[in-house]
Image (cartoon, rainbow, N blue to C red):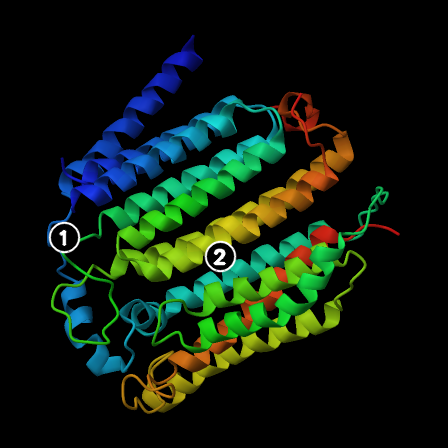
Amino acid sequence: MNGGAMFYGAAIALIIGGIMIAATKRNLIKIIIGLNIMETGVNLLLITTGYISGGTAPIMNKTWTKVVDPIPQALVLTAIVIGIAVTAMALSIVVRIYEKNNSLDIRKIKEMRW
Amino acid sequence: MSSIIIIFVSILVLFMLGATIVAWVTKDLLIAVLSSGAISLIASILYLILQAPDVAITEAAIGAGLTTGIFVYVLKKTERFEK
Amino acid sequence: MIKKVLIILLFVLLGLSLYSVVKYNTFGKDKTVVARHYIDYGMKETGSQNIVTAVVVLYRGFDTLGEVTVLFLAATALGALLHGLRFKSKEKEPSSLIVSTAARYIFPLIILFGTYVFVHGHLTPGGGFPGGVIIASAFLLLFLAYTQKEVSEKTLSLTEGTAGILYVITGLLGLVMLNSFLANFLPKGIPGKLLSAGIIPLIYILIGFKVGAEMTGVLRNLKEEEK
């Protein structure tokens, strides 16, 4: 069996699992954990599309001929750092909400209803 | 890819799916945070198998190190158990 | 009822888009068209052995400047939101003897390793961003072992601000000398030596200092409690 089914299956399972956690749970911190899992899945999907069979890592200490695609790796390097920035900022907002309402349940936060 | 690597990757992917289900079901938020750190660590091993060492170092340092630390500090300031 | 239908429609749409990503990118096929130029001529044009580093700093350097800006914005907003909160300090027991003794010996080694990772960004995998985060992890170990340890906020913001301004000044120097922002104006050197690859070591040292100081500031803001 091709190895690609394992990698693609893992990435898609993480994306769908992360969205399900973020959509069905009521605790604010668990929603942020779900978003974090989904971002890990998206980065795994991006790097899996860049793999070339028989290629090595893109570091040219000897002249290789078959090298893995370096552009998705440069993109994912940026995406991981921005993921942690968004998570840290969301957690500071959660700390403020807890200090005001004394509860982490999104049904009890009355000012956010629309 | 040789079949030994495919079997190894399958076992790691099963651990990753198990960690996702644990993060869904548990009511103790500390266990959910640690499962998220475990998913990042297994993803870092998968990046190394896909010949991407830069991304593996970055994901291990950020996902399994710093994000877990920030979550634990926030859990100390709020509640640990989901009601 | 409408909500359930909408949720099912959303998941069907998501499944279709993910399936199309998987179908048109067969696993392991040679599909590099744009990257062919970077792989063949990357080491000759930039002088760095690590091609991912050359893409991140030189070919797509402006996006890295945007990423540094987003990180700075998130850290500053976190500091502004958590400023002046007053929490009762809960019961804290001091850490055990093993943790506090080991932290004293391991802390300089972790900082040395982080510095090694971002100085050798053009020769080995790694670069500025994981190097800075490793330095922040060393400070996290220190905060966990000695809970009364204070790191002055003025030093952290001074380091972070200076590194950011020097990054922009390096870009402007490239504009003045070679007519394009963030151009490579230092000599390329022999690939494989430490002092080679133009402005890549300079920019990665600045990014390493900036990310390390920023993440330490984030941890310090989250740790603070009223005495």
Disc 2 crowd rating (10 Å Cα; few below 14, some 14-19, many 20+) is: many
Q: Secondary structure at mark 2?
A: helix
Q: Is residue A55 left or right of residue C159?
A: left
Q: Residue furthest front?
A: C98
Quadrant of the image occupied by residue B55: bottom left
Q: Is residue C221 left or right of residue B69?
A: right
Q: Is residue A20 above or below residue C129?
A: above
Q: Amino acid at mark 2?
A: Ala
* Residue at the (47%, 65%) spot, across then down: C129
Q: Is residue A36 above or below residue B28?
A: below
Q: Is residue C174 above or below residue C148?
A: below
Q: Is residue A17 above or below residue C102?
A: above
The N terminus of chain C sits in image quarter: top left
Q: Amino acid at mark 1?
A: Ser
Q: Are marks 1 and 2 on the same chain?
A: no
Q: Chain of mark 1?
A: A
The label shown at residue B61 is 2
Instruction: Count every numbered label the image shows and give the total.
Output: 2
Return the residue at label 1: A53
Q: Secondary structure at mark 1?
A: loop
| Location of residue C214 in the rendering, given as x and y in whole percent from the top left corner | 60, 64
| Location of residue C223 in the rendering, given as x and y in whole percent from the top left corner | 73, 52
